[in-house]
Each structure stands twice: as structure tokens, then as C-alpha cells.
Amino acid sequence: MKKFLLFLASIIASLTAWADEGYAIYNHADFTLTFYYGTMPKSAAYSIDTYSSFPDWINNYHNTYIEKVVFDPSFAQARPTKTDAWFYEMERLTTIIGLEYLNTSEVTSMSAMFYSCRRLKSLDLSHCHTPKVTNLSTMFSACDSITTIDLSNFNTSQVRTTNYMFKDCRMLKTVYVGSEWTTNSINESTNMFHWCSSIVGGAGTTYSYWHIDKEYAHIDGGPENPGYFTGKNIQGDVNGDGEVDVRDVTTLINMILGTIDMNEAGNVNGDNDINVMDVTALINLILGIL
């Protein structure tokens, strides 16, 4: 009998686990869309898994009202396989809370995810790892108020298309990427940076209408290797070109002298102050002492 009860308990546990899923609930009272993971309620909830090109909360036109998106901590257990058009044309959206609970490790497509989110000022997607993503087309297109996007944990080794990815992001100035950003597999990048007229790479490269595809979709290496992105999470990479060398020392000295603005990359030794001690730490780093 004891073995039978244990067997029965294991079946119940497996069925309960099987019933858990990611879902979203729209609250019209405060214009909020909240993502959860668990047993989905029988009504007033939308599954995140759909065969449609758009999720059901978009098909039901909630996107025209939503002002805030919340990812509940429970959603960290969800493993969506695509996030296409999740926030499509949410033109009133100003706030996203809990993005750190969005696990993108199994996602294969993020097409049009934030398309025309016209009121978003910045996006921190640094918690999102994307080893299986193949499609980033129109992901941020028409986000014409956004100024900063952090993609520093994106792995783009499998990405095939970035068509119109940042198209018409006219206020976009800074895009952070990390060491796993690569364009090696991208074969479609039409108008990737069309009309991103404010963008500036980490080493000072500015927008050129003649370079709006993947050619400049990398960490800025200055005049020798211009790019539109800024490196992040690389200790000592003060100028954001993806390398740590004497040019970073020059940039750091200019920060200390006040000839260029300071930023967190100059805090090489991690003491939250930027001074000559960081120059010493940077030189030691270059020499291999640290």
C-alpha cells in the first residue's frame, strides 16, 4: 500500500507540474499586463504559447491601452520559445517591471517584440541570454523616444536576420553589447539602423546614412573599425571599443582631466571613484599584472 501511495503521489506531482505554464493577465482598471507562471486561471488569462503571429493580448487590442508591464517573480520558471510581438504597438507603455524574471534561454525569435513602443525611454535587457535566437527583425523599430538599450548579455551566434531592428529609433544614442555579440551568421540586415540619427558608438562613431546594415553592428573600434555599439562588462575597456589597450589609458586620463564626460567604465579598480588610482589599475591590467 505504501508503495502504491508513493506511486500515486508521484503521478499527482507530475500532473501538477505539467499543468504549470506561463500566462499573462490584463487588468483594465490600471492598464497593466502581468506575466505569471503556474496554473493558468480558467478565464481572463492568456497563454504565452500561441501559433498566431501575435499573442492573444495583442489580437484582442489590449495593446492600445497598456501603460505598464510587470513580470511576476514566478515567471522566472517559464521558458517561452518565442517573444514575437509581445509588446507590439503598445504606444502608451512607459514602464516595464521585473524584466530580470524573463528567461530567454529557449527563445528562437524576438521579431517585433517592442515594435512602436513610442514612449519607452530605455530598455535594460542585460538579463536576457539568447543562445537560440535566430530572428531579431524589427525588434525595436519605431521606438522613437528610446535613448538607451542594453543588450550586453545577448548571444547572437545563431541570429540570421536583423532587418529593420532599430529602424526609426531617432533618439537612440547608446546600445550596449557584450563579448557574445557577433554578426557572423547574419545574412539579412536591411535598414537595420535606418534613421538612427542620434546613435554614437563607444569610441565616438556617429550615424552615417551610408552604413545602416550589419556593417556597423559591432562594438565601436574608432576610425580604424567604426561601429555603432558600446562595449560593456569588459574591465578596463574605458573607451568602449571592445579592447583594453593604451587608448583606454588616454580616454581615462581625459575623463580625470575633465575634457570628456566620466562614465562607469572609468571605475577600473571598482572603488566607485574615478581618479589616478584607476589609471594605475588600468596600466597593471594591460601589463597583465592584474
Image (cartoon, grey):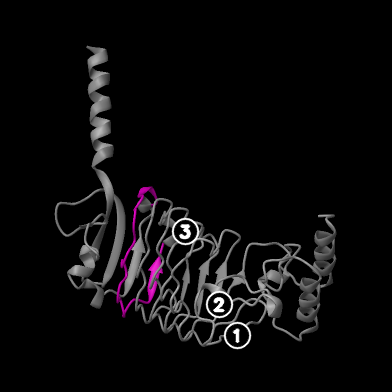
| Mark 2, other Cα within 10 Å: few <14 / some 14–19 / many ≥20 | many
Magenta stretch encompasses residue 81: yes
Q: Which residue is the extreme one toward the front?
A: 187
Q: Which residue is mark 1?
A: 206
Compared to residue 236, the image places residue 93 above or below, namely below
Q: Which numbered dot is residue 174? A: 2
User: Does dot 1 land on a helix, a strand or a loop?
Assistant: loop
Instruction: Identify the residue shown where x is 25% and y is 25%.
Output: 9
**CA distance for labels 3 and 1:** 27 Å
Left or right, 1 with respect to 149, comes to left
For the C terminus, the image quarter is bottom right
Residue at the extreme top of the image, as rendered: 1
Label 3 sits on a secondary structure element that is loop
SS for dot 2? strand
Q: Amino acid at mark 1?
A: Thr
Residue beneath disc 3: 128
Residue 97 highlighted magenta (yes or no): yes
Q: Where is residue 162? Give x, y as percent.
A: 43, 69
Q: Residue at x 42, y 80 (%)?
A: 167
- Identity of the amino acid at label 2? Thr
Which residue type carries mark 3? Cys
208 or 289, nearer to the observer: 208
- The magenta segment: 76-98
Q: Residues within 10 Å of mark 3 (few under 14, many from 20)?
A: many
How far is mark 2 from mark 3, CA to CA?
18 Å
Q: Earlier in the sequence, mark 2 or mark 1?
A: 2
